[in-house]
Amino acid sequence: MRDIVLIGLNHKTASVDVRECIAFTADETDRALKMLREDPAIGESVLFSTCNRIELLMVADEGQKAINTAKQFLAAFKNVPIAQFESSLYQYQGDDAVRHTFQVAASLDSMVVGEPQILGQMKAAYRKATLESTSGVILNKLLHRTFFVAKKVRTETGIGDHAVSISYAAIELGKKIFGDLAGKQVMLIGAGEMAELAVDHLIRNRAGTITVANRTFARGVELAERFFGQAIKFEEIVDTIKDVDIVISSTGATDYVLGKAQIKKAMRSRRNRSLFFIDIAVPRDIDPEINRINNAYVYDIDDLKGIVDENVEDRQREATKAQRIIDEAVIGFRKWYDTLAVVPTIVALRGKVEAVARQELEKTLGTLGHLPDGDKQAIKRMTDALVNKILHEPTHFLKKNGCYGDKTATLELTRKLFNLE
């Protein structure tokens, strides 16, 4: 039987400066999957990278070998020494890997427990794996089951009732800084889902003019038009920053979008009015060195933890109910997984019986050359039906009845009885 293994790090085990070194962009994920597909130590793989976690879910003949290979791969691909991130890694095998995958999709392992974005991000990661053909029979089954379990948790518990998003937490942090966001000028750098969510909260808090800067200008215009804000080109960020109070950044850039020298120059034209940066991107968009400039303050995604810990008691109560659903789902998946061990024996048994039937059928029909084709076809159909009826009970037995626990003895006896190779 192949092993299901998972290796990764997240906001609980690694600080943002470690996560951003290992984070994968969409293009990097495509390239990584192609390379993993060619590695003989890894049979199936799905790579999952968000601002708060990087995980590699795998199926392999030897679990520990796959984990060691994955560590080497991450270090080589990201050009980062293993020692820099190894202590932050967690790894799971078998049922523990399945349980962790269910928990992540159900948002029990998120910084914001109950937030809905994680499920969409996992579906996108799985879509990439299917396009690159790195997901096979086992991960296909596991991921489809994962999405079902996540939906069930959200439907049957109140896990999402008290949930907030990272964007909401960013706005709450802004309120704690200013006391009130009414009239504050805000710049959003990036026009993705995080920015869209942030806009809703900003409008609710009566923020002043909202400016959107996005690398794809048309996308920035589209978002700005929806709330009567203004769009600027990416190159205009530094010139425009003199007029804003808060910058919220959430791009997919791999390097800093704003550096210390740029902001130092901009602060002069602001006459040193305070400027706050809330950076919810991983890798980070805002150079943390900007914190050294007078009246410039940078908060990154790890600074949001205090905000999202509010109402944790309510969410924890619902998380306990969700955990019960997940534990049941792990048992269900294990039952399906165990049936895979009997498949080779069932296939061999069917092949043996079908071969005998085919041989006897050909011998019999050879002596009945006078029969019309219709009668010959009827005899063939009867033979196929006999094979199916004979194999039905033993197949059912091997898959379900009498085959719980260690199946080894049952499978060995079956192979001896029918002389299966």
Image (tube, rainbow, N blue to C red):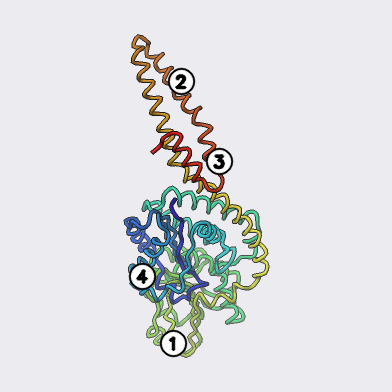
Q: Decide: marks 3, 1 in contact (CB < 8 A)?
A: no
Q: Earlier in the sequence, mark 3 or mark 1?
A: 1
- Residue 148 percent coordinates (x, y): 55, 51
Residue indicated by mark 3: 400
At x 63%, y 62%, the residue is 319
Query: Marks 4 and 2: which is nearer the front?
Result: 2
Numbered disc in front, either 3 or 1: 3
Q: CA distance from mark 2 to mark 1?
A: 88 Å
Which residue is rendered at x = 51% and y = 27% of the image?
Answer: 389
Q: CA distance from mark 3 to mark 2?
A: 27 Å
Q: Earlier in the sequence, mark 2 or mark 1?
A: 1
Label located before the other in sequence (3 or 4):
4
Q: Position of residue 38 (x, y in %)?
A: 31, 56
Select label 4 or label 1 by which is in front. Answer: 4
What's the residue type where badge 3 is placed?
Lys
Q: Which residue is mark 1?
A: 267
- The tag on residue 75 is 4
Q: Amino acid at mark 1?
A: Met
Q: Earlier in the sequence, mark 4 or mark 1?
A: 4
Q: Residue at point 43% right, 59% down?
A: 63
Given the image, on which type of amino acid does mark 2 rest?
A: Met
Q: Quadrant of residue 164?
A: bottom right
Q: How many neighbours does mark 3 have within 10 angstroms: few (below 14), some (14-19), or many (20 or more)?
A: few
Q: Amino acid at mark 4?
A: Ala
Labels 3 and 4 touching (C-beta < 8 A): no
Query: Residue 382 shows which numbered tag?
Result: 2
Name the element at disc 2: helix
